[in-house]
Each structure stands twice: as structure tokens, then as C-alpha cells.
Amino acid sequence: MSDINEFLNADEVADFLRLPRSTVYKLAQDKVIPGFKIGKHWRFRKDTFHEWLKKQESQNAEPGKLEN
């Protein structure tokens, strides 16, 4: 059986991104962030979510801009 820590719930994603939970639901429903529903509950695979974040960071990085 999979480790329960492999998954994040909507509250954990909202806390991590510092967004309202309603925004996380909207982004998940619109397939902006990777997640899936089990019944009424959204779940986010932790490794997939972190890969998505890295992709977002690299896509939004400005060329030639140095990070502090």
C-alpha cells in the first residue's frame, strides 16, 4: 500500500502556495494544477505537484535575470 505522505490534500496545497482553498479547487477543476478527485475530495500526488512547481518556475523565469 502507498505511503499516505505521497499525497497532499487541498488544505495542504493551499497552505503551501499561500492561496485560499477555493482558489486551489478552481485551479484543480480547470486542470491548471495537477490533481484528481476521490469522491468529493481533491488529492495531489506530492512528487507530481513538486514537478509541476519546478516547471512553472522555469517557464516564468525571466531570461538574464539573476536570482538572489
Image: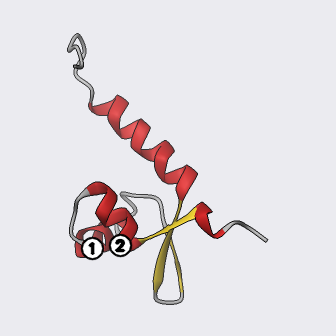
Q: Is residue 67 left or right of residue 45?
A: left
Q: Is residue 54 left or right of residue 47?
A: left
Residue for point 39% across, 72% down: 10
Q: Which residue is mark 2?
A: 11
Category of crowding for the residue at label 2, using alpha-carbon neighbours closer than 10 angstroms: few (below 14), some (14–19), many (at least 20): some
Give above or below for 38 relative to 48: below
Residue for point 48% across, 53% down: 49
Residue for point 22% across, 63% down: 19
Q: Which residue is mark 1?
A: 21
Three-letter amino acid code at disc 1?
Arg
Residue for point 33% across, 57% down: 16
Q: Quadrant of the C terminus?
A: top left
- Residue 38 lies, in percent from the top left, at 56, 83
- Residue 44 lies, in percent from the top left, at 50, 65
Q: Is residue 64 left or right of residue 33?
A: left
Category of crowding for the residue at label 1, using alpha-carbon neighbours closer than 10 angstroms: few (below 14), some (14–19), many (at least 20): some
Tell which residue pokes out farthest to the bottom in this image. Answer: 39
Q: Are marks 1 and 2 in contact (CB under 8 Å)?
A: yes
Q: Residue 32: which quarter of the image?
A: bottom left
Disc 2 is placed on an element classified as helix
Disc 1 is placed on an element classified as helix
- Residue 62 lies, in percent from the top left, at 22, 21
Three-letter amino acid code at disc 2?
Asp
The disc, 1 or 2, on the residue closer to the chain's N-terminal end is: 2
Q: Quadrant of the N terminus?
A: bottom right
* Nearer to us in this view, 68 or 51: 68
Marks 1 and 2: which is nearer the front? 2
Tell which residue pokes out farthest to the right in this image. Answer: 1
Q: How many marks?
A: 2
- Residue 4 lies, in percent from the top left, at 63, 70
